[in-house]
Amino acid sequence: MDISVSMPVAKPASSTRGLFRVVLRAFITALYILFLMLPIYWLVTMSFKSTNEILGGFTLWPRDFTLANYGIIFTDPTWYNGYIASLEYVIINTILSVAVALPAAYAFSRYRFLGDKHLFFWLLTNRMAPPAVFALPFYQLYSAVQLFDTPWAVALAHTLFNIPLAVWILEGFMSGVPKELDETAYVDGYSFSRFFFKIFMPTIAAGIGVACFFCFMFSWVELLLAKTLTSVDAKPIAALMTKTASTSGYQLGLLAAAGSLTLIPGAVVIYFVRNYIAKGFALGRV
C-alpha cells in the first residue's frame, strides 16, 4: 500500500516581492493623499475654533467646538453677498468664454486660412500675460462706461484669459472628432446650426465640461482684477476676507470659516468633471 506524504510548498520569491510592491505602493499612495488633505483638514478644523484657541496652542481638533464663525458669515449681508457676487461673475464669465470659444475652436480645428497659426498663437499670448498688466486699463475703461463695481466688469475682464484657454482645450477635443461626421451630416440635409448643436456639441460634451471647469477655476481664484474692478456691491469673497484684520489682529477662526466655504464650489465642479480632467490637461489628445 502506497502512502504519499504531502509536503508544504514554499511560495516563490517573486510572489512575495510582488505582494511587497503592492503594499508599498498602497502605503505611498495613502501617505501622499494624507499629505494633500492635511492643509484642508487643518483649515476646516480651525474654522470650528475660536481665535484664542487657535493662538493658544497646538490641537488636532477643536477643544471648544463652535459654529460662531459660520454664524457670522451666514448672518452678515456683507459676507454672504461676497459669495453671491463671486458666483455671479464666475458663472457669467464661464458662459461667455465657452460660448465664444466654441465657434472659434471649430474654425481652428476644421479650416485652414491665412494667418491661422499666428492668430492662434496671439490668443495664447493673452493667456500668458499677467493680470496686473491689464488692471489699470480695465479700471479706466469700466469706470468710463459705468461698469465699475459690477459682476459684468470682472466677468468681461476674465474673458481675456479664459477664452484663449477654452479655445485651446476645445480645439484639441474637436480635432479628435473625424471630419467625416460633418460631411455625413451635410449629406443628410443638416444645416450647420442644427448639426453643431444637435450632433457635434453632444459629441464633445466632455471637452465642453472640461473647458467650463478650467474657466470656472481661474475666475474663482483670481483676485487682482476682481479686487481692482470692484469696491462695495460686487466685491468678491476673497477680497472680503481681508476684513478679518483689526487692531487686535486677525480673526483667524472667521478667516478659516470663509476659506472653507470657498472650497465648496470648486469641489462641486470637480465632482462633475472628475472623469475628464486628465483628458483636459492633455487638451483632448489622450
Image: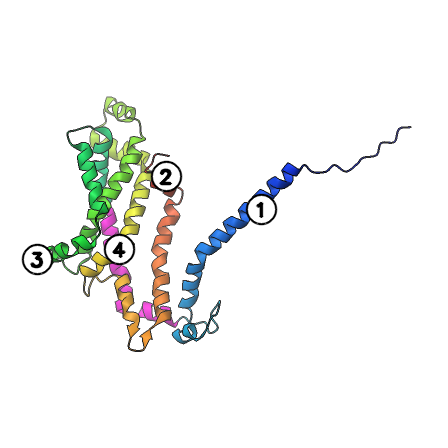
Q: Residues within 10 Å of mark 1 (few under 14, many from 20)?
A: few
Residue holding disc 1: 23
Which circle's residue, 4 or 1, is located before the other in the chain?
Answer: 1
Above or below for 155 versus 149: above
Q: How many marks?
A: 4
Cβ–Cβ below 8 Å for labels 1 and 2? no
Left/right placement of residue 122 relative to residue 201 reads left
Tags 3 and 2 touching, CB below 8 Å = no
The type of residue carrying mark 2 is Lys
Q: Which type of secondary structure does the marked residue at label 2 adopt?
A: helix
Q: Earlier in the sequence, mark 1 or mark 3?
A: 1
Mark 3–mark 2 distance (CA, rounded to whole Å): 42 Å
The image quadrant where one finds the N terminus is top right
| In this rendering, the label closer to the viewer, 4 or 1 | 1
C-alpha separation, residue under disc 2 versus residue under disc 4: 24 Å
> x, y (%) of residue 210?
32, 43
